[in-house]
Amino acid sequence: MTDNSQAVAMEGGGDTVWVEHEAFIDRIPRSVAMIFLFVAVVGLWDIVTRLGWVSAIILPTPAETLDDLVFVGANLISGGYMLEALWTTTLTVFYGFVIALAIGFSLGVLVGETKFGERAVLPYLVAIDTMPKVAFAPLFIAWLGFDISSKVALAAFIATFPIVVATAAGLQAASENERMLFKSMGASRMQTLIRLKLLTGLPYIFTGLKIASVGVMAGAITGEFLGGGRGFGALIRQSASQLDTPRVFALILYLSLLGLALYFTVVWAERRFVFWNKSGRPGGVM
Amino acid sequence: MVEPQPIRSATITPPKRPVYEIERLSKTYARNRLVALDNVNLTINKGEFVSVIGSSGCGKSTLLKIMAGLMPPTTGRVVLEGRPVVGPRPDIGMMFQQATLLPWKTAVENIVLPIEIREGRGAAKQAHDKAMDLLELVGLKDFANVYPGELSGGMAQRVSICRMLVSDPAMLLLDEPFSALDELTRDFMNMELQRICLERGATAFLVTHSLAEAVIMSDRILVMKARPGQISEDVVVDLPRPRTLEMINTERFGELVGHIRDLLGKDAHE
């Protein structure tokens, strides 16, 4: 945290007295600051749309957006077609994440633990990782069709790479002394991998999972944009093509709840499994 | 006027029971053909505390790794308790520059880790009582179920002393164990280590950078010179046991430190 406080010298009788003033931003609570920013942004948004500076097709008024939020929310709660779409996307994201975790973790161990993986597999992974992975979407659709599996494939494909990189990096995180300790205790390679390297690497792996949880959402929605189907992405595209901008806004907001749920599940799991890393050595930022 | 006592070389000490014997040890790294150690001969007797000191790159870390069975020598005989050292052994205990405790295990779980690795979880559980005794020995009985994140640097190193002792090693190998601690803690830990070694009649080999630490801790100090790594002098420290920190102020301590500094300086300027 930055220290915005300022000290002012007051010339008293003999000694100089330093009076510290806490900066204004340090004195207001975080929640008040957040609400203030929210009100300011929505207020500006309202003024801009009300005065007609921006076309209603491009940017709806806050009131219209709120109407649509209520409408979509009602549909979701009453178990309408939107809830079905959200459930389809949830399944896509879930399957994509689980597949990415399984493949990403396995490849990460292969790359991080074996010379073969490091020398032969890693260069190909780096080459594929530099490609825009969304460009593979038409291929997945051609291979797997228009149902959920092509979306799952794209979501998993995008989310795999951060997990591979994080796992491989995590396996290198154990210090030279720790490796020497395990060697001196006569630990087998498997014992060293599981009881030292993987556990030491867990904070890294969870950082990868957080990045993957964002990527898997992007993959699922992109897949639904390009491959149709019954998911939330298809609903958004449909509303957008009808220039129903308030609906698009409302759908995106509800979709973000799915992303948040996944992200915070990962955060919760990290707190649960990496209980010793309170300082948040790596991955504290993401 | 008292005649200054000569500083002896180890060749004239009476023979005792050897624990660790090294003969004609050489190590050449295949990678860059560097001769790290050349014709090193060394005997460490039961209950002796021997230090090795030398400039960085003199091969003392290589020597320690070979003695621990972590690295094979190129030629030579390396024998602990009558059996050649061909790999890591349970009768060798090690300490490192850092405590290297696993943060997801409690103090007591860390102490029994060597047993868990070698003999499984069941044996490790049975060793809990022994681990508790060791924690009492280092004055950390109340910290058995504390995670390393809540221990100070000195406390963590005391736990790692317990881990080193849990399998009753015949030989302790200490790789600059307290170099990461502040000086006051370091002095205190050295005195603790001496007490534990004397209580258990332990045989120890210490790698250090500190002249004062080497003199206050050791019965003998091996001075190494670099390129190629060789033991140039084997200095006997004739300060009485148990050593105290006050001995640092004695004339004899100063003479010994000066003598070793001369030996190291001679090597550095050659």
Image (cartoon, rainbow, N blue to C red):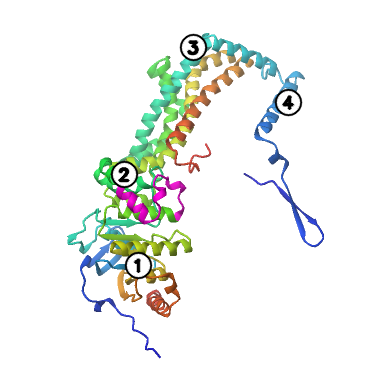
Which residue has dot 1 on it? B58
Which residue has dot 2 on it? A192
- Relative side of B251 to A8, left or right: left
Chain for disc number 4: A
The type of residue carrying mark 3 is: Glu
Mark 2 secondary-structure assignment: helix
Q: In the rendered structure, does residue B224 fall within the stretch colored magenta?
A: no
Which residue has dot 3 on it? A84
Tell whether label 2 touches label 1 (CB within 8 Å).
no
Q: Is residue B146 visible?
A: yes
Residue A182: x and y, percent?
Answer: 31, 49
- Determine the CA span between mark 3 and mark 1: 72 Å
Q: A32 above or below A255?
A: below
The type of residue carrying mark 2 is: Thr
Chain for disc number 1: B
Residue B144: x and y, percent?
Answer: 39, 47
Which residue has dot 4 on it? A44
The type of residue carrying mark 1 is: Cys
